[in-house]
Image (spheres, grey):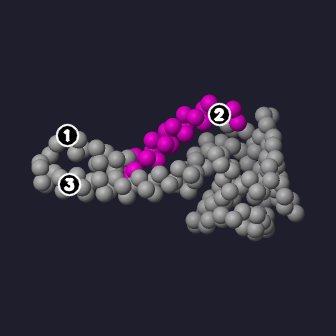
Amino acid sequence: MKINLNYRWDKNAFLKANYYNLKYGEVALIKKIGGPISIVLCLATMFFIYIRGFKSQDVIPFILVTYFYALRWPIYKLQVSRNFKKYSERDREISWEIGDEVLKGSVKGTSEGQFSWDLIKKVVKTKEGYLLHRYPMFHWFPISAFNNDLDIKNFEDLARVKVKDFVNVK
């Protein structure tokens, strides 16, 4: 069985892939522990303000909470947007041929390569596509790149069999 995908690696696809990687990839652990730690720091700071009065360093935990819960994605989005301008594969057609043993990818006019399923450590299914983690890098397969619903189903079935860590976040 072969599944073919084709899509344009534009800024929108790049941002979506990076958003889901930020949310569910390796760096997601930082968010999972960073947010609660910053909340605990805020509570402790409020306690110390109550006990000893306000000091200038008491602002730091509140800045951390603001960052983790309000500013993290906008700042990251700005950085990713800047990186996209430097990206040699921007605005090019990406093609994938997905088989039972090997995934072959190519970027029109620049590069191509292949790798086996055992290099994929995690697949994250989102409402907009699939994020395949091949640490430290990842690959994005948007739903719109599949030819039909049968290809989506076949890909998902294959990914569930080949990759131990399959996460559905819809």
Dot 2 and dot 3 residues touching (CB under 8 Å): no
- The C terminus appears in which quarter of the rendering? bottom right
Q: In this view, does 74 lie to the left or right of 118?
A: left
Q: Nearer the viewer, residue 129 or 120?
A: 120
Q: Is residue 97 above or below residue 127?
A: above
- The residue at which mark 2 appears reads as 87
Kindly report the distance in space between the C-alpha atoms of the residues bearing marks 1 and 2.
Answer: 41 Å
- Please name the amino acid that badge 3 sits on: Met
- The residue at which mark 3 appears reads as 46
- Please name the amino acid that badge 1 sits on: Ser
Q: In the image, residue 148 lies at what x, y percent?
A: 77, 63
Number of the label disc, if any, that sits on residue 56: 1
Q: Nearer the viewer, residue 79 or 144?
A: 79
Kindly report the distance in space between the C-alpha atoms of the residues bearing marks 3 and 1.
Answer: 13 Å
Can residue 39 be seen here? The reply is yes
Q: Which residue is drawn at 58% across and 35% down?
A: 83
Q: In the image, residue 89 lies at what x, y percent?
A: 70, 36
